[in-house]
Image: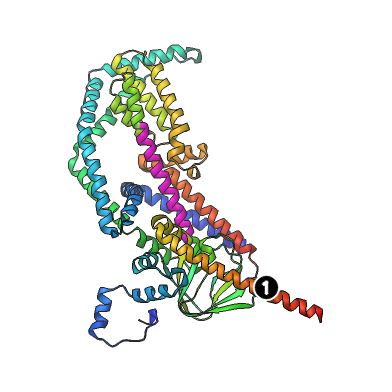
Amino acid sequence: MSETGEGAEPMSEAFLWKNVTRKEGRKNVMDILRGVPLFESLGSRYLRYIERVLHRRTYMEGEPVFRAGDRGFALYIIETGEIAILDGKTGKEITHLREGDFFGELALVSEQPRDATAVALKESHLYGMGRADFLDIVETHPRLGVLVLVNLARVIAERLQQASIQLKRLTETGETDRGE
Amino acid sequence: MTVATRILVVLLIIALGGVLLYTMFTIGAIVALFLLSLLFAFILAPAVNAVERLHIPRTPAVLIVFTLFFGGLAFLVSIIAPFILSEIMHLQEIVSVGQMRRAVRDIEVFITRRLSFFGVRRLTLAPKVEEWVGVALDNVVNIASGVVGLVLFVVMLLISTFFLLKDARSLKKSLVRMMPNGFFETSLTILYKIERAIGDYLRGILLDAASIAVITTFALWLIDLPYYFLVGLFAGFANLVPYLGPPTAAVVAAFISIVDTGRFDQVPLIAFVFIVIRLFDDAVVQPLTISRSVRQHPLVIIFVLLIGGQLFGIIGMLFAVPVVGVIRVLGTEILAGVSASRSSPSP
C-alpha cells in the first residue's frame, strides 16, 4: 500500500476485505479530493464522477511535469511527493507544493501556454485531470460543472487579489526608495 | 535528433504503417466487425451518457439503451424486411425473364445514337449488367437467408458494442496510462478531439442518411416510381458515401424505371427529383446534421473513399472520412506541440 502513501498494515480481516471489496486507493483519492478547494462542497457522488476522470501519473525526481511555454491541457493534484514551481524566465523557485496541493488549474479554462515550469523534487504521484475530461463533465453533469467552475473562479479571484496586494506593496516600496 | 535519425524514424513509421495496412487488409472481416461495433458505440454513447445523468450506473444505463435501441431496430426490421425481400424477389424475376436484358439493350441503343459522333457503334452492356445485378440481388438474398452466419455476426456485434460502450472510459484511461509523461496532456487532448471528430461525423452522416432515405422514398412515391421504397432505402444507404453515393442512387432509380416500364419517360423526372433532393441536402439537412469542423476537401474525400472501399468495402467507405479527420487532428496537435516546445524559454 506504499503506493497510496499508507504504511504497511498487518494481515487483519479488515485488510483482506479492503483489497477484495474496494478499489485500491479509492478512499485516499476521495480524501485528497475533499481537501482540494476546487472540489469543496461537493458530495461523495460528485466526487466519484471527478475521480473517474483522474489519471494517476508517477514522476521521478527532477522530472518536469510541464515546462513554461508548453500548451496547458491539465490540472494536477499531488497525491504524494513534492513539486517545485519555477519561474518560466529566471528559473527561480516561486513556490513549493506538497501532498494535497494542486497546480495548473488555469489549463482547465484556457489554452494559453504555461508561464511556469513544474518539476518533481522527489518521486511524486500526481492525479491529472485534462481539460477535455473537465469539459465532458460540464457537458454531461452541468450542475457539477457549475460548482467546480464557481470554485475555480473563486481560487483565481483570490490569487488575483493576492497578486494585486503584492503589486501594491512593491509599488509603495519602490516609491519610498525613490523618495529616500 | 540528427537528419539520419529523422529519416530512419520516418522510414520506420512508413514501414509500420504498411505492415498495419496489410494486416488490416488480411483480417478485413474482423476489422469490419470492429468498425461496425465502433459505429454503434458512437451512435449510442450520448444516449448512455444521458441515462447515466439520471444517476443510473453505467452498466444498467448501457443495458437500458441497448434494449430500447436494438429492440426498436428489430421491430422496425421485422416490419419492413418482408416488404423489401418481396420487392427484391420481384426484381430477381424481372432479371430472370429477360425484361432487364431488353431494357439494357434499349439503353445501349439510346447511348450509341447519342455518342455516334465519338465513333461508338456497339456496347456490350447487357451481359455485364445482368451479371452485376444478378450477383448483387443474390448477395442480398443470401445475407438475409444465411441465418446462422447472420445471427453469429449480430451476436458478436452486440457483445463488442456493449463492451465498447460500458468500458469506454477505462479503455481510454488504459491508453493514456501507456503514454510517457511528456505526452500525457497532449494524448488527453488528441483522444478528446478524435472522439469528437469521429462521433460528430458518424452521428451526423447517419442522421443525414436517414433523413434522405425518408425524403427520397416520399418523393419517388409522389412520381410513382416502381419499387420506390427499395430505391428510397438504397438512396439513404448510398448517401453514407459522400459524392459517389447520391448519383449512384439516381442511376439505380432510373435503371429500375426503364427496366420496369420499358420506357425512358420517367428518367428526366427522376433526375430532377434527385437534383432537388441533393440541393435540399446540401442547403438544409447537412448544415443541421454534420459539423463543419469534420468536413474535408472534396478531392481528399473522393480519394480516401476509394481507398476505404477497396480495403473494407462499404464500412471502409463510411469510416474513410473520419479517419482523415483523425490524421488531421494528430498532425495538428503534434505540430503544435513541437512548435510550442521549440519556442518555450529555458528556465
Chain holding disc 1: A
Left or right placement of residue A121 versus residue B60 in this view: right
**Disc 1 target residue:** A167
Q: Amino acid at mark 1?
A: Leu
Residue B191's spot in the image, x, y percent? 45, 57
Residue under the image location 24 percent in, 42 percent down: B72
Left or right placement of residue B210 versus residue A120 in this view: left
In the displayed structure, B8 sits above or below B321; it is below
Q: Can residue B317 be seen? A: no
Residue under the image location 21 percent in, 47 percent down: B152
Q: Report the quarter where the C terminus of chain A lies.
A: bottom right
Q: Which quadrant would residue B71 be assigned to in this image?
A: top left
Confirm whether the magenta stretch covers residue B199: yes
Of residue A65 and residue A30, the one placed in the foreground of this image is A30
Q: Report the quarter where the N terminus of chain A lies.
A: bottom left
Residue A64's spot in the image, x, y percent? 55, 73
Magenta segment boundaries in residue numbering? B188-212
Residue A72's spot in the image, x, y percent? 54, 63
Q: Which quadrant would residue A145 be assigned to in this image?
A: bottom left
Our reading of the magenta stretch's main secondary structure is: helix
In the displayed structure, B25 sits above or below B9; it is above
